[in-house]
Image: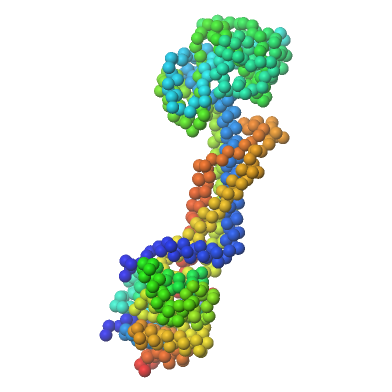
Amino acid sequence: MASQTVRLPLSLLARLSVRNLIRNARRTVLLLASVAVAVASVLVTASLIRGFQDDLADAVVVNLTGHLQVQAPGYRDDPGIDHRFELEAGWQRALDGLPVAGWASRIRVPAVIMSERETRGMTLVGVDAQAETISFLASASYRGEPLVDVNDRRVIIGEALADSLKTDVGRRLVLMAQGPDGRSREAGFRIAGVYDADGTALEKNFVFTGRTRLHELLETDAITELSVRLDDSGQLPAANAALASVFQQQRVFTWQELEPQAAAMYAYADLGIFIWFAIMMAALIFGLINTLVTAVMERVRELGMLRAVGMRAAAVVSQVVIESAVVMCLGVVLGVLIASLLLNFWLVDGIDLSQWAQGAEMVGMRSHLQPKVMLSDTVFISVLSVVVGVVASLYPARQAVRRSPLEALRAD
Amino acid sequence: MKSVIDCRGVSRTYADDGVPVRALQGVDFQVAPGEFVSLAGPSGSGKTTLLNIIGALDKADEGLVFLDGVDLAPLSASELSDLRLHRIGFVFQSYNLIPVLSARENVEFIMQLQGVAPRERAERAHDVLARLGLADMADRRPGELSGGQQQRVAIARAIVTNPSVLLADEPSANLDSATTEELLNLLRRLNEDQGVTIVTATHDPLVMSYARRRVQLKDGAIVHDESV
C-alpha cells in the first residue's frame, strides 16, 4: 500500500503552487515587484562597488606598484641601494602563457633634491620610459616633455614638487644619492617635464630619470624592483607563483601586500555588497513571510482537505516552499532585467563625481565612477536570493501543517 | 464475512473550554463490505466523531479500530495518510474541492498522489466523470459548477481510486432536496451496482431513508441499529 504512494508529486505540487499564485494575482505581483526591486538594487549597488574596487586597484597598480613586484629581501623595510638585485637573462619565460600587460624594472633610491631656492628629500627613480606603459607615467599629462627612453639623462618632477622647489621646465636641479659603496654622489639634471598626477603623493615625492643615467650616477647595474602588470587580475596567484619560482632569492609581493590600506578598503567594499544584500533581504523576508503566512491561513481548510485525503505533510510543506521558490525565481529574473536596464541605459556613462572629487580621491576613487557588472556577482546574488526565499518560506510552510487535518477542516 | 470497518469499545473524550466532553463511549460498530450505512443522531451524539475515527482523521482514546483488518492505533501520521489515500474515499459537507484545479484535475490528483500513470489517470477520471454525468464539465473549475455538481465531483474524486469504504459527512448539508435526491440515487447506484461500501453521518431523514442500515447514536453510544 504505502510503497505505491508518491511522496512528493512534484508536477502536481508545481501546478498547485503556480495556480495558487495566479489565484491572488495582485498580491503575487506586489511580491514579485518587491523581490525584483530588492534584487535590482543589490545588483546595481554591487556593480557600483565593483567599479569603485576597479578604480581603487587601478589607482594602486598604475602608481608604480603593478599587480606584482619583485624586490630584494629587506628592501621593503629599508628601501635603498643596499637591497638591490640583478635580472637574470631569460627570466621572462616564467610569464609565458600568462596575461601580462607589461613589466618594468626600476632602481628607486632615497635622494636629496636641490633647486636654486630649496632643498628637500624625495625618492629618485630610474626608469625605462618605454617600459612604463604599465604605470601612470604613460598616461599622466605633462608640461614640457615626458622622458623618452632608458638613456634619457633629464628628469621629470611632479607639479607639487615643482611648486615646492619654485622651479619649472628647462631649469636645472642637483640630485644627491648614496651609491652601493656608501659614498654620496651628486649630479646636475635638467627638468624635461612636470607631470600632473592628480595631486597625489607621487607629485610631491617622486622624481624620475632614465635608468641608465641613474646607474651611471650610482655606479651599479642593479635594480631595486621589477614591476609586472597583468591584463587579468584573476591570474594574479598564477603569476605570483611563476615569478616566485624564478626569483627564488628575492621576494615577490602582490599589490595587496605592498598597499595594505588599499587592499583593506578593497575587502571592505566586498563586505559592503554583502551588508547591502543582507539589509535588502532582511526587509524582503519580512514581507515574504507575511504574505506566505496570509496565503496559508486563507487556505487552511483546503490544505487540511489535501492532508485528509492522503497528501503527506511533507508534500504540503513542499507546495508552500515551491510557491516561494517560484516567486523568488521570477522576481530574481525581473530584478536582473531591471538592473540590466538601469546599468545599460541610465548608468551606461557612469556617475560623475567631480563635485566631490577631493573626497572621492581620499578613498581611492576617481572623479568618475563606472559601474562594473560581474557575472559571478549576478549569479551569486540571484542564487542566494532564491535560497534565502526558500529558507524563509519554511516558517509559513510549517504553519500549513501545524494543525491536524481534522482541525484544519474545521477551521473557519 | 470479514468486516471492512471494525470498531471495538471505542471511546473518545474532547476538552471543550477545559471541560471534558465524552463524545463516544465504548462503541462497538462493524460494517461489512457492500453495506450502505447511515449514522444518525442529534448534534453532539458522536456520529461525526465516529466517522472521523473510522476515517483515520482522529484517534480513539480507548478501544480498537480496524480498517480492512488493519489496526489503526499503531500507525504513524504518514502511514495513516497512506491508508486514507489508498483505502478511504471522503465526501465532505462543503465539497472541499481544490478551487484552482478543474473537475477532471480534482478527480485525477488523488491518483497522482497514488502514483498512477498519467494515461491511466486520464482514462479513469474520464470514466468516472462520465458515469456521474459530468463529462461535459470536466474542464470547469469548482467555482463554475453548481453545489450539486461540485458534490458529484467530490464523489467522483472519492470513488475513482476504488476505496474500501466511502465516508460521507453530511453530504446533503449544502444541497436542495432535488439535488440531494439526485445525489442519493447516485450513491445507491454505486452501492448496489458496484458494491461500494458507504457510511454517512447525517441529520437528514432523506439521506437515512436511502441507507439499508440505520445506526442511531445518542450521547456517544449506539442506541439503535437496524437493517432495512
Question: Could you say which is closer to the camera, residue B1 or residue A156?
Answer: A156
Q: Residue furthest front?
A: B136
Task: Report the residue at 58% width, 38% height from top.
Answer: A372
In what quadrant of the picture does the N terminus of chain A appear?
A: bottom left
Q: How many marks?
A: 0
Task: Report the residue at 62% width, 15% height from top.
Answer: A147
In this rendering, position of residue A160 left or right of residue B71? right
Q: Residue furthest bottom?
A: B228
Question: Could you say which is closer to the camera, residue B191 or residue A173?
Answer: B191
In what quadrant of the picture does the C terminus of chain A appear?
A: bottom right
Question: Could you say which is closer to the camera, residue A383 or residue B129?
Answer: B129
Q: Quadrant of residue B36?
A: bottom left
In this rendering, position of residue B46 left or right of residue A206? left
Question: Could you say which is closer to the camera, residue A60 or residue A137?
Answer: A137
Q: Quadrant of residue A211?
A: top right
Q: Quadrant of residue A150?
A: top right
Residue B219: x and y in percent read 43, 87
Above or below residue A376? Residue A198 is: above
Residue A227: x and y in percent read 52, 21
Task: Report the residue at 40% width, 78% height from top.
Answer: B128
**Is there any visible trace of residue B31 in the rendered image?**
no
Above or below residue B55? Residue A297 is: above
Above or below residue A376? Residue B77 is: below
**Is there any visible trace of residue A333 in the rendered image?**
yes
Above or below residue B219? Residue A404 is: above
Residue A41: x and y in percent read 60, 47
Task: Report the residue at 71% width, 13% height from top.
Answer: A168
